[in-house]
Amino acid sequence: MAQDIRVRFAPSPTGPLHIGGVRTALYNYLFARQHGGTMILRIEDTDSNRFVPGAEDYINESLAWLGIEIDEGVREGGPYGPYKQSERRDIYRQHVRQLLDSGKAYIAFDTPQELEAARAAIPNFQYDAHTRGQMTNSLTLGAEETQRRIDEGQQYVVRFLVEPGRDVEVNDLIRGKVVIKSDILDDKVLYKSADDLPTYHLANIVDDHMMKISHVIRGEEWLPSAPLHVLLYEAFGWSDTMPAFAHLPLLLKPDGKGKLSKRDGDRLGFPVFPLEWHDPKSGEISSGYREKGYLPSAVVNFLALLGWNPGDDSEVMTMDQLISKFSLEHCSKSGAKFAYEKGIWFNHNYLMEASNEALATLFRPVLIENGVDPDKFTDQYIAEVVGLVKGRINFVRDLWDQARFFFVAPITYDPKAIKKRWSADTPAQLKEMITIFDTVDDFGGPELEPAVLGWIAEKGYHLGNLMNAFRLTVVGECKGPHMFDITRLLGREETERRMLAGIERIRIDEPAV
């Protein structure tokens, strides 16, 4: 592409960033990076009534966690700022005046009550060429009356004048050419005097033009707005600089029909936000992918494949690989079911590929939450523990379930295992096993396992029962990695102490519970 590629992600700070918005940001980022372009973060905060404190910081933190780097934005600065719409009022006023002076827009004074009465009186009412002549606006009032009302301080809006009888073409990079009759478009509100701020439609167009946006990559829900935006570009005389449009498919419910919602996540037990969100008004806490134990690389990989394919059989891909393969041509036109189980699969794969040392660092807070001081163990010990059990986990928090016995000796024992594996002869046999341990100089070396297995064979003891009883005393249940890998890490003293404690505590005459 010869032109400079400049894309933007433009969320509103009205709450937590939905996972669908994250995917939009990701696709913009992949596209920009592949073409050596610029990624812009613009905060669209013109809807002052819906502003939520903390939402802007949440957006920035979410993108940073996922590795979506911003080149220009509120925090980063840039040559086309400000990047927050509430700080661009003077710019919007100038463009509103330009449309009014050129006759491309008009002022309307209709009150909410008058609009409601029109909806009740006119079936399928919309404010357009067929109805504007019956409403209270500068077209029906005249210039003098309009100015008088403004001088008196009456609240008003500025509406775009949509001329009927036109075919409006939108050339979409994903959906092809879309043609819309202008007759079905209403005269959208572009500006409200009440808060001296533009609506999305005007601010979006002005900012995209002034920030030299080359491609608008956004969700399918914005497709109905595209014809109006084409007309606005024409009205300003900017048709030659109009960005290319690409409308992404919706993220759909994992089951059933319709758009993915927070309720689906609550119902099926998966997050729909990248980070945990604390609602400042209600106090409600919504789960996030980070706090649930997902790795950011896994979330990125999972989201990238919801509505796009690389054109081959690749699944597990790094950010760099996604950048090299990404193309809008391979984006789907139809919605993508949010198969959250696949996200779990990706997380498992990325945990398997992560170094033991990296996972050990992530595991430390989990140990603390469970009452274990990780500083009592060496970094090498924790990393080796992780290495033994990580193949069994989907999330970092699962490490505790799989490895707790490496940090806390058991004080209770699985009653079903006792019933199946423990007999009256077991205590004596385990004590005899301890004497075999003492014949091996290097308890953590390769000699211990053949020594124990040879002794069991020589004595004619039941291998399965005795080794599981051995595991029961050390672990508390019959699970975990290879037994001699466990004892190698625990060491001779701790292994023997646990065995003797188990022999003392386990009673076969106790009823199973």
Image (cartoon, rainbow, N blue to C red):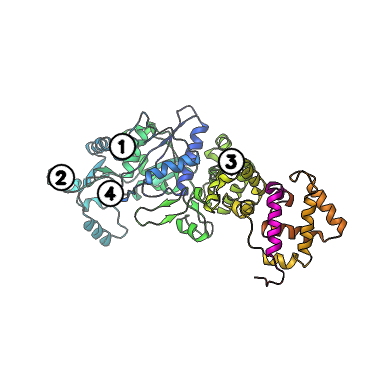
Question: Marks 3 and 2: in contact by CB < 8 Å?
Answer: no
* Nearest to the observer: residue 323 or residue 234: 323
Rounded to the nearest whole Å, what is the CA distance between mark 2 and mark 4? 23 Å
- Residue 358, label in figure: 3
- Residue 129, label in figure: 4
- Which numbered disc flags the more N-terminal residue, 2 or 1? 2
Q: Secondary structure at mark 1?
A: helix
Is disc 4 surrounded by few (<14), some (14 to 19) or many (20+) residues within 10 Å?
Answer: some
Whether residue 283 appears in magenta in the rendering, the answer is: no
Query: What amino acid is found at the position of numbered circle 4 in the picture?
Result: Ala
Question: Marks 4 and 1: in contact by CB < 8 Å?
Answer: no
- Which numbered disc flags the more N-terminal residue, 1 or 4? 4
Q: Secondary structure at mark 4?
A: loop
Residue on which disc 1 sits: 235
* Nearest to the observer: residue 228 or residue 363: 363
Residue on which disc 2 sits: 150
